[in-house]
Every structure is written in C-alpha cells, then in structure tokens.
Image: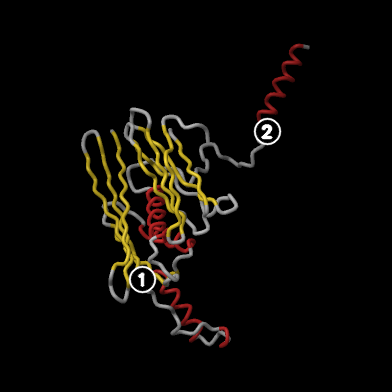
Amino acid sequence: MLARFSILAVVAVLASGCANTSPVLGGKNISYGDTKAVELVTNEFGSTDLQMIAESMTRSLAQSGILQGRPVVQVYDVKNKTSEYIDTREITTSIKTQLMKTGTARFASDNTDMQSQVDQLKLQNQSGLYKKSSVSKTGNMVAAKYRLEGSISSIVKRSSDYKDVFYKFSLQLIDVESGLAEWMDEKEIRKTTER
Amino acid sequence: MGKFKGIAVGAIRVARENGFLTAKVQLSNITSSNQMMYYRFAWLGADGFPVGDEEAWKVLNLYANQATFLPAIANVPQAADFRLEVKTP
C-alpha cells in the first residue's frame, strides 16, 4: 500500500517535471541575447562599438543643422586604419539607416549599389522588354550634393598588467562642388583588459 | 527600475535645437570610490510612448565624487520627452 502510494507520487512528480510549457525547441546551451547589451567578450572591435559610433555620429550630423532641405548625400567607404579586420561598410550602413530614419537626408546610390542601379536602368531602357510609359528613363538620376567619408584608427598599448585599445572614428561631410568640409565629428572609444 | 544607490541625478536641461530634442543630465557619483554604470536614453513622443528604436547601453566610468553631464540628442524629430535609464552592476 505504501509502496504503491510512493510509486504514484514519483510518477506524478516525473510527469509534471517533463511538461515543458514554453514554446522552445531544444535550447540546452543556446539562448537569444539582448542586441543592445554592452559586449565585453574580447578587446577587439565589437557590436557595442559599432552601435555607439553609428548613434553618436548620426545624431550629431542630424542635429547640426547642416542638412537643410533634405540634401542628397553620397556615402563613401570608411577607411580601416586599424590592424584588425573591421567591416567598415556596416558602420556606414548603420549611419545611413539611422540618418534616413531621422528624415534629414536622402542618399544617392553609392559605389556598391551603383552597378545594380546601372544594370536596372540598362535593362529597362535598352532590352525592349518593358512598356515605354512605365520605364525609368536614363539621364534623370539626382547627383549628390554632399559626400560622407570617414576613417577609423586604433592605438594598442600592452604592458604586463594591461592591454589598452583606443579607437578613434572620424567622419566628415564634404560639399562635392566646393570641396569644403562642412561638418566633422569624431568618436573615441577606449577598451582596457586587465590581466 | 528601482532606487539609485550611490548616484545622484542633478540638473536637467532640455532644449530643441535644429528640430531635435537635446537633453543634458547631470549625474554625480556620491560615493568615495570609482563607479561604473550603464545608461541609455529612451525617447518618448508627444503621447508618452517610445519613438524609434531602443538605444544601445552606454558605459560611464565616474571617479569618486565626480559629477558629469550626459549629453543626448533625440533619434527622431518627433521625440518630445525622454527617460534616462541607469543601471549599476
């Protein structure tokens, strides 16, 4: 009688323990993290640095008052002058996206999109496949008024106790016609590893 | 998020410059040891609800008894108010 009761109790506990009510499949060591969290995995350029740079550069440019009347901007590459591999195109993509959202600027096709832009125009105008009234005509692309260019460099110092990495990102807005830099800003980041 | 321990929020100045809301918040470390904290601004629209995406958390290192100003610019021109979130480890 006691044995049967204890067996029933054990079965009940096991059954309730096995009931997984959260909509997750697998997931022993894997979980989704916070994309906005501060990432301190290694001393190298990380997601938080990318976010910090994109945010501060965009806000500074949008609020500077230089972009009057939603001018057309062409984004050029950010030169990577550090010794690490950094996908600088992602920095400019983030800056472009956030600037677009503020509504203060419009962007011309940059050198990476230019080939697809030219291909599409050629396809529409020269292949003879499209209805003439719906075709986007060549010769009507809007040229950029400003050029956005930047660079990122780093200074790495090592001692027996510390490894210190100092990043400096600078971005400038240049008027294409006059060649003058109308706006410039920089962001400094320091990451230190204490051994 | 709970009460502040060791940090005091001082003067706050809010202005609208060139169409964007800007804020400067004074944050002081009232303890006598260095403190590391994480902060971010949450921008709210005229209706009190957040506008735009969440910001990334930023790191701030305050020396003992140091006060500093956190400058911030809104992410979209529609922002009318803000909230400062501070987290200490």
Residue A24, compared with residue A72, is above or below; it is above
Secondary structure beneath disc 1? strand
Residue A24, compared with residue B81, is above or below; it is above
- Amino acid type at image mark 2: Ala
| Label disc, if present, on residue A180 of the rendered structure | none
Of the numbered discs 1 and 2, the one sitting upstream in the chain is 2
- Residue named by callout 2: A19
Secondary structure beneath disc 2? loop
- Amino acid type at image mark 1: Tyr
Residue drawn 69% across the image and 28% down it: A16
Residue drawn 41% across the image and 72% down it: A72
The spot of residue A121 in percent (x, y) is 47, 80
Q: Residue furthest top?
A: A2
Residue drawn 27% across the image and 54% down it: A153
Residue drawn 57% across the image and 87% down it: A133
**Image colouring:** secondary structure
- Residue named by callout 1: A146
